[in-house]
Amino acid sequence: MEEVVNIRPAVRSDCVAIVGLIRELATYEKMLDQAVVTPDILANDGFDVIPPYFQCLVAEIGGGENTEAENSAVVVGFALYFTKYSTWEGKALHLEDFYVTPTHRSKGIGTKLLKRLAKIAVDGGFARLTLECLEWNKSAIDYYKRFNAVDMTETEGWHVFRFTKSVLPSVAGVE
């Protein structure tokens, strides 16, 4: 019997599960030491401030119509995103992290998450949806290309730069 997958907006009580998935993703990307967000930080930044700094979709399996079954639902994937602005095209969405646990991959769950996010973009009149992908993650690159995503490094030579927390004081002149 095929598991029922529910794609829904995350709620505050999902933060522990989402952080667990973030840590799984960071482990996969060989960067676990950089994943320092906690459920409290996530809850504050996504649910306790207005406007929230991010929005998130979760994919859950299990659960059902009654309360007891719903408590048995398990979050197996997420898509964390936020709005940004393109000076050339206007409002845009940025997909920060997109992940499905390995045991639930190849079941269409990631595609359901991506399609729901694309629908949010279309319905909201957003000009684009952007994301970054590690160059060694060929399966993810191929996946995005199957949906006609444009690899901006290949086509236009864009590079992503980051000013980290440790260098920001120096850049700001407030060392």
Image (cartoon, rainbow, N blue to C red):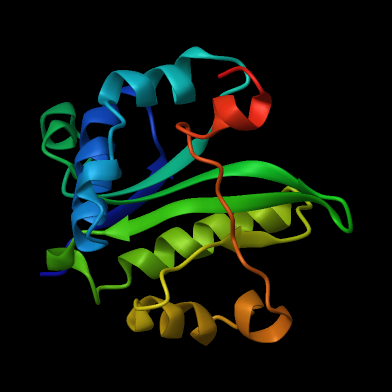
User: Residue at the location (61% across, 17% down)?
Assistant: 174
- Along the viewing direction, whichever of 123 and 137 lies nearer the viewer: 137
State the residue at coordinates (87%, 58%): 89
Q: Nearer the viewer, residue 102 or 32?
A: 32
Whether residue 163 is visible: yes
Residue 5 at x, y = what percent? Answer: 28, 57
Residue 166: name its quadrant: top left
Indicate the quadrant where residue 137 lies.
Answer: bottom left
Q: Is residue 119 above or below residue 136?
A: above
Q: Position of residue 61 (x, y in %)?
A: 20, 52
Q: In terms of image quadrants, where is residue 68?
A: top left
When the figure is inspected, residue 115 is found, relative to residue 76, above or below; the finding is below
Residue closest to the eye, 171 or 41: 171
Determine whether 99 is above or below 166 in the image.
below
Q: Is residue 79 left or right of residue 84?
A: left
- Looking at the rendering, in which quadrant would you find the N terminus? bottom left
Residue 155: horizontal and vertical position, in percent? 69, 85
- Extreme-right residue of the structure: 88
Residue 99 is left or right of residue 154, and the answer is left
The quadrant of the picture occupied by the C terminus is top right
Name the residue rendered at 66%, 23% in the picture: 173
How many discs appear?
A: 0
- Tell me the residue at 25%/73% (across/down): 107
* Left or right position of 174 against 137: right
- Above or below residue 58? Residue 40 is above
Residue 32 is situated, as x and y percent measured from the top left of the image, at 21, 48
Asked whether the viewer can see residue 151, the reply is: no
Side (left or right) of 170 relative to 126: left
